[in-house]
Image (cartoon, rainbow, N blue to C red):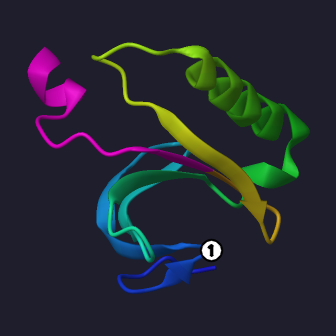
Amino acid sequence: MDLRDGVILRDYRIIRLLGEGGMGEVYLAEHTLLGSQVAIKRLNPALTKDAQFSERFLNEARIQAKLIHPNIVALQNFFVEDGVYYMVMEFAEGRMLKDVIA
């Protein structure tokens, strides 16, 4: 599925791409019923065919689900849609970590 602006993915409307890297992309989205903004991280669909990457992404979600701290965004949901893995996280407005480090 192409996640262009305005596309509906389950209960979320994609607003825009926030960033991308080697393993996937992160999108800003809005919950269609609640109106809250979230960040949706998608594993690159080409990588979902490799069990090692899929397991690594799932493990990342499991670890993040256990982390509860005011300085760490909370994992709200995890799902697989059409064979592609997604994490729905709290959206925190502000500077990106890579910019802070630079």
**Stretch of the chain drawn in magenta:** 87-101
| Relative side of 90 to 43, left or right | left
Secondary structure of residue under mark 1: loop
Please say whether residue 102 is visible from this viewpoint: no
Q: Residue furthest front?
A: 34
Mark 1 sits on what residue? Answer: 10
Quarter occupied by the N terminus = bottom right
Check the image and report above or below for 57 versus 93. above
**How far across and down, in percent of the image, does residue 64 sit?**
57, 23
- How many numbered marks have been drawn onto this rendered protein structure? 1
Q: Residue at x 28, y 17 (%)?
A: 71
Q: Residue at x 12, y 29 (%)?
A: 99
**How far across and down, in percent of the image, does residue 60 sit?**
64, 26
In this view of the protein, which residue sits in the foreground, 15 or 48? 15
Q: Is residue 1 magenta?
A: no
Q: Residue at x 69, y 61 (%)?
A: 45
**Residue type for callout 1:** Arg
User: What is the crowding at mark 1: few (fewer than 14 residues within 10 Å), some, or many (at least 20)?
Assistant: few
Please say whether residue 36 is visible from this viewpoint: yes
Check the image and report above or below for 90 versus 2. above
Q: Residue furthest bottom?
A: 6
Check the image and report above or below for 97 versus 44. above
**How far across and down, in percent of the image, does residue 80 sit?**
77, 58
**How far across and down, in percent of the image, does residue 90 sit?**
38, 42
